[in-house]
Image (tube, rainbow, N blue to C red):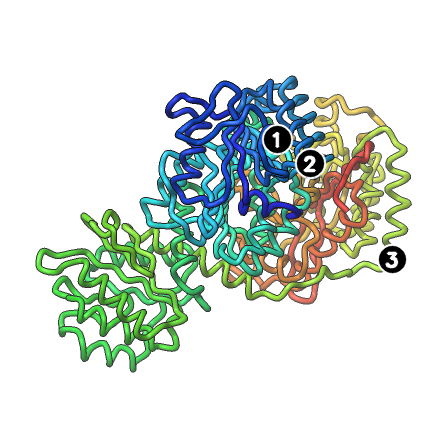
């Protein structure tokens, strides 16, 4: 919700509540920044003990201000006085507040209660509030307004920044200024008592000055709504996000800092990828990518030409691009011929194009122009390692002239290596410049991923399961919920999945050795025997799975071994069944499942199956619902994808049927959110014309149903 947020960035009057006479105090710095950055509205310092500060008349409280209403109150008084300020703000018609003060939910339950009471006061009055525990807000375009305590005046520009950390916000402002990047808006959210990251994403989406959105977050206030908001915004403006809490220790640190809960990192990454958000790993990566998105058009494809004067850096760049999934294409014969006419014989017109060390600005200019005119080149990365006789600035200026005189819709990223005064000078070029080839490669990859995501048409979820099947499963789940165990018995698991179009091999649940012998005759060798109790997971690790059984002696041995596993685990006699099923020699073992995340709802997982899922962690996650294109992308992202295409003589798997299986699972957990966990491992992808076969499956239900995702 973006209602009344304009008062935070475009106030006509600002009251700074808690300004001190003390130099370098936070309130004093905010007052100073407002004035020095050129705020042309009215400023009212509030201090009951001072008549004037910096020659500006002070007022004892908000009520004493000779104005009907105040658009923005920036509050820096100690936490125990903030509630009284909020009550006074309501009485005096204040439109918005920024609470800089710390000491609320981040310090414990008492602070949380105080924050909640202030939130209610402001919310009931319609006062939009940033913070508490933040560094303020900034508007870098006219009418200017710097309501932060940053020690320097940041540049105005086109980056809309969202920071959950005030301290990091200060660093970010300094770093961006050093890179000559400016902000359209900057907001430090702090504890997100009212305004949160979703609100700001929606606000920046409408802000004409904001071209790229950057964010540092420690938690999501409204994770269930994040994907929907971010997906909508990303279709028009790129969102680059640095999310802390990747590790367990990092997640705990984030909780202690903000009083918020950090989500599982794999789920968060899935939410971002589903929404078109580019996730980065550091502040350095955040601004490196921002520079690319701000200063270059998006690539229309993955074919990259490399232009360099040094073979080593060109090779490093080539390796980086290929490892990131980009393509170093072979240049056309016409392009190679044209390049050969402008470069010396010892240079190379291949890709990478090596101009050799003697290359001057003129050679770079002519070669770059030729590459940009090649229809089979989607983007160009230029590397320049300065030799003694050629000035870096001359090459940089020549590239600038080409892009100004002959504008292109292809991105040109540059890497000027060595002692690079360009990065530290006052010169500001209209194209992105990096110090190392790997950085340029990663930024271009991010731009391509986003470009491809944005160009993909929105797709509705596919419904593959008829309503009558949904009704049947609803009855099965209702019956299962009446039983003591959260885990569903094997017979009901199979029935639920079959109603949703999944297939199982011919199989029988056996409760005696005699029945086991009969089953071998009905199904036929070779067989699989495995323990059928849901109380034991990781059946293979426990010695509870026997494959490719070909004789009665082998199945008798398997039965007795499984009963020993049950005895060791103290499984009750009534829960010691054995599952016997047909053994398949071919096919690719995969794992397909879903679990419920407290923040983001149901999450789908696809990975390498069997024991490989634990060993190599080849897994892909997506939030539900999953449409056809997302399902296909999940499959292609598997490291084991090559196995599905046929490997060493094995037949190619039916990818279309696998896509349908993913969609059916998505529909299952969407239709029946009581399913808190489902695990099909392994599920066997079979050759074309055949559905995947589930070899083992488990379903867990939530007896206490508190899922909030629709």
Q: Is residue 286 above or below residue 52?
A: below
Q: Which residue is mark 2?
A: 598
| Secondary structure state at the residue bearing disc 1 | loop
Which residue is the extreme one toward the left? 389
Rate crowding at label 2 as few (under 14), some (14 to 19) or many (20 or more) other CA atoms within 10 Å.
some
The 10 Å Cα crowd at callout 3, few under 14, some 14 to 19, many 20 or more, is: few
Q: Residue at x 21, y 68 (%)?
A: 364
The residue sitting at 38% across, 65% down in the picture is 411
In the image, 168 versus 351, the foreground residue is: 168
In the picture, the disc for residue 261 is: 1
The residue that label 3 is drawn on is 467
Q: Position of residue 609 (x, y in %)?
A: 61, 46
Q: Residue at x 72, y 26 (%)?
A: 564
Q: Nearer the viewer, mark 3 or mark 1?
A: 1
Distance CA(mark 3)–CA(mark 1): 37 Å
Q: Nearer the viewer, residue 571 or 410?
A: 410
* Left or right: 468 in relation to 215: right
How many neighbours does mark 1 have within 10 angstroms: few (below 14), some (14-19), or many (20 or more)?
Answer: some
| Position in image of residue 236 (x %, y %) | 56, 60
For residue 654, say whether it is visible. no
Q: Which mark is residue 554?
A: none
Q: In front: mark 1 or mark 2?
A: 1
Against 344, is 23 above or below? above
The answer to the question of whether label 1 and label 2 lie on touching residues, with beta carbons closer than 8 A, is yes
């Amino acid at each position: 919700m973006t209602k009344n947020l304009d008062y935070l960035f475009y106030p006509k009057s600002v009251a700074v509540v808690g300004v001190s006479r003390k130099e370098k105090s936070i309130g004093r710095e905010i007052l100073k920044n407002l004035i020095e950055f050129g705020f042309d509205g009215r400023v009212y310092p509030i201090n009951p003990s001072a008549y004037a500060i910096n020659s500006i008349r002070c007022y004892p409280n908000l009520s004493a201000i000779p104005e009907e209403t105040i658009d923005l109150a920036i509050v820096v008084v100690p936490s125990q006085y903030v509630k009284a300020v909020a009550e006074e703000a309501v009485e005096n018609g204040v439109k918005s507040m920024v609470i800089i003060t710390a000491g609320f939910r981040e310090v414990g339950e008492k602070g949380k209660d105080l924050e909640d009471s202030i939130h209610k006061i402001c919310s009931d009055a319609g006062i939009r509030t940033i913070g508490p525990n933040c560094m303020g807000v900034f508007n870098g375009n006219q009418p200017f307004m710097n309501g932060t305590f940053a020690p320097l005046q940041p540049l105005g520009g086109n980056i809309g920044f969202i920071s959950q950390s005030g301290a990091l916000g200060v660093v970010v402002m300094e770093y961006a200024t050093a890179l000559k990047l400016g902000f359209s808006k900057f907001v430090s959210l702090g504890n997100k008592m009212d305004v949160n990251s979703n609100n700001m994403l929606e606000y920046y989406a409408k802000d004409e000055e904001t071209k790229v959105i950057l964010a540092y977050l420690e938690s999501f206030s409204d994770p269930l709504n994040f994907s929907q908001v971010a997906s909508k915004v990303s279709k028009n403006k790129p969102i680059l996000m640095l999310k802390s809490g990747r590790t367990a220790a990092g997640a705990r640190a984030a909780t202690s800092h903000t009083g918020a809960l950090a989500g599982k990192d794999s789920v968060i990454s899935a939410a971002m990828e589903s929404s078109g958000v580019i996730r980065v790993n550091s502040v350095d990566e955040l601004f490196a990518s921002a520079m690319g998105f701000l200063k270059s058009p998006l690539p229309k494809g993955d074919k990259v030409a490399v232009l360099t004067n040094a073979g080593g850096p060109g090779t490093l760049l080539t390796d980086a691009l290929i490892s990131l999934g980009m393509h170093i294409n072979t240049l056309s014969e016409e392009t190679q011929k044209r390049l050969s006419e402008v470069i010396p014989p010892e240079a190379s017109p291949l890709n990478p194009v090596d101009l050799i060390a003697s290359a001057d600005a003129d050679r770079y200019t002519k070669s770059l122009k030729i590459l940009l005119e090649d229809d089979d080149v989607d983007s160009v990365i230029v590397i320049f390692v300065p030799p003694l006789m050629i000035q870096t600035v001359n090459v940089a200026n020549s590239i600038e002239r080409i892009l100004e005189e002959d504008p292109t819709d292809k991105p040109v990223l540059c890497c000027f290596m060595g002692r690079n005064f360009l990065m530290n000078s006052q010169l500001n070029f209209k194209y992105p410049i990096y110090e190392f080839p790997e950085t340029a490669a990663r930024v271009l990859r991010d731009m391509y991923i986003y470009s491809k995501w944005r160009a993909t048409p929105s797709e509705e979820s596919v419904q593959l399961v008829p309503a009558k099947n949904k009704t049947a499963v609803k009855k099965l789940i209702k019956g299962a919920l009446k039983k003591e165990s959260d885990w569903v018995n094997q017979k009901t698991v199979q029935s639920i999945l079959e109603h949703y179009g999944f297939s199982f091999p011919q199989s029988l649940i056996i409760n005696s050795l005699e029945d086991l012998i009969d089953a071998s005759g009905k199904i036929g060798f070779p067989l699989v025997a495995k323990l059928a109790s849901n109380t034991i997971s990781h059946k293979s690790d426990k010695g509870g799975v026997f494959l490719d059984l070909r004789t009665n002696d082998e199945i008798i041995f398997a039965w007795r071994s499984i009963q020993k596993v049950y005895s060791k685990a103290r499984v009750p006699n009534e829960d010691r069944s054995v599952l016997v099923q047909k053994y398949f020699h071919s096919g690719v073992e995969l794992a397909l499942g879903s679990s419920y995340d407290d923040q983001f709802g149901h999450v789908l997982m696809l990975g390498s199956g069997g024991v490989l899922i634990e060993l190599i962690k080849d897994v892909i996650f997506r939030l539900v619902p999953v449409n056809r294109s997302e399902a296909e992308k999940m499959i292609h992202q598997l490291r084991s994808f090559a196995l599905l295409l046929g490997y060493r003589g094995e037949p190619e798997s039916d990818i279309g049927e696998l896509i349908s299986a993913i969609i059916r699972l998505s529909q299952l957990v969407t239709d029946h959110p009581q399913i808190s966990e489902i695990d099909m491992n392994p599920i066997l992808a079979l050759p074309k014309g055949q559905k995947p076969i589930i070899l083992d499956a488990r379903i867990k239900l939530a007896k206490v149903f508190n899922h909030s995702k629709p």
